[in-house]
Amino acid sequence: MENLQQLLFTEIKARIRPNISMVDEIASLLNISNDSAYRRIRGEKLITLEEIQKLAAHFKISIDKILNLSSDTGTFSGKYITADNFDFAKYLGQMTTDLEFINSFKQKEIIFFSKDIPSFHYFTYPELAAFKYFFWMKTILQFSQFNNTPFSFDILLKTMIDDGMKVIKSYNVIPSVEIMSIENINTTLRQIEFYKETFQFKHQEELNLIYDKLHEMTDHICHQAETGKKFMPNQNHELLTGTYKLYVNDFIIGDNSNIVTVDNNKLSFLVHSHINYIVVNDERLTSYQYAFIQNIIKKSILISDVGEKYRTRFFHLIHDKIEQCREGRMQTIGKL
């Protein structure tokens, strides 16, 4: 039991930000004194089952892992987003909090395996962020207040723009790897096509501006890939520390999941139902997913820093797809 207790507190220590006192955190959570918390951490006093439950639930720790049980079950955490419980400001705020938590570690990395352009890139351009926000709320989450409302930039709140900027600025300082395919841009383009075919754009000028901003976003991603750094447009990338590796593959489309490594510990963010995600820290799953993604990387082409030929061709094809959509040449089921 003493060994298991040591394992539990070792897991807890790995999940607490370096600037947070583990003793204070545990004392507050268990409603005990700091001295009592110290004695539990040192193994001088055994913790109760109720305390184990509180600690495991709060720090999202698998009891199976601590007890070294072999089973096909695992633990995860996450919330289901609905029109009743969703608040975009809180959603973006939580993204910023998660990113700041990752950035608090000395060693960190995020790997994205995308089927869409990672949402962080859209946050850099308020017009694109506005469209994605609206599509998620109206079409995916079915917010009743948007039932008979066409898309317009007027709907976007300034707070949403500011919150999105906080997210991208937090993301830009964390080293990351993104695995993309030419098909990734199709997710947004098909959303645009759907709104065009159902007459859900209020102004043609705004639709044209969205296409223009998609081109700008594509150029900016290309520039980041060329320099191997993440930065805001017109920002001096030489002063930044967030490295950027971009891989391209033609044989498999990702699922928008990502895996985070912090000081040799791994967290898996698994996307489901388009905008929902669950967080898994089960070592079996994260190790399996990490090995799978590393295998995909080995079979992909690195186009950041090096690979100018493939980088130029990749982004040229994305620009061409955007123009196909603008000119109505993109094939969709509605045109068959």
Image: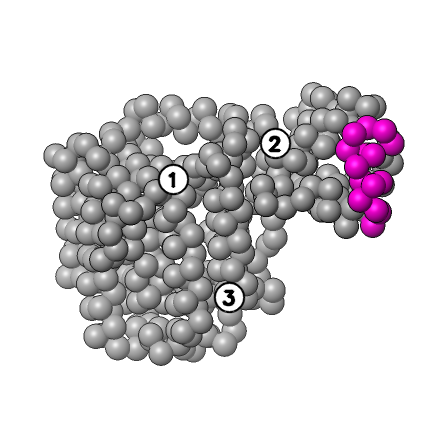
Q: Residue at x 48, y 29 (%)?
A: 289
Q: CA distance from mark 3 to mark 1?
A: 25 Å
Whether the residues at callouts 2 and 1 have beta carbons within 8 Å, the answer is no
Which label sits on residue 89?
Answer: 3
- The answer, for residue 114, to whether it is visible in the render is no
Which numbered disc, 3 or 1, marks the residue that appears first in the sequence? 3
Q: Position of residue 45 (x, y in %)?
A: 87, 32
Q: Is residue 217 left or right of residue 160?
A: left
Q: Which residue is mark 1?
A: 175
Callout 2 secondary element: loop
The quadrant in which residue 282 appears is top right
Disc 3 packing (10 Å; few <14; some 14–19; many ≥20):
some
Q: Give whichever of 86, 168 is nearer the camera.
A: 168
Q: Amino acid at mark 1?
A: Pro
Q: Position of residue 285 (x, y in %)?
A: 56, 29
Q: Is residue 225 left or right of residue 259?
A: left
Callout 1 secondary element: loop
Which numbered disc, 3 or 2, marks the residue that appears first in the sequence? 3
Dot in front, 2 or 1: 1
Whether the residues at callouts 3 and 2 have beta carbons within 8 Å, the answer is no
The quadrant in which residue 226 appears is top left
Q: Position of residue 158 (x, y in %)?
A: 40, 74
Q: Which residue is mark 2?
A: 282
Q: Is residue 32 magenta?
A: yes
Q: In the picture, which quadrant includes the N terminus? A: top right
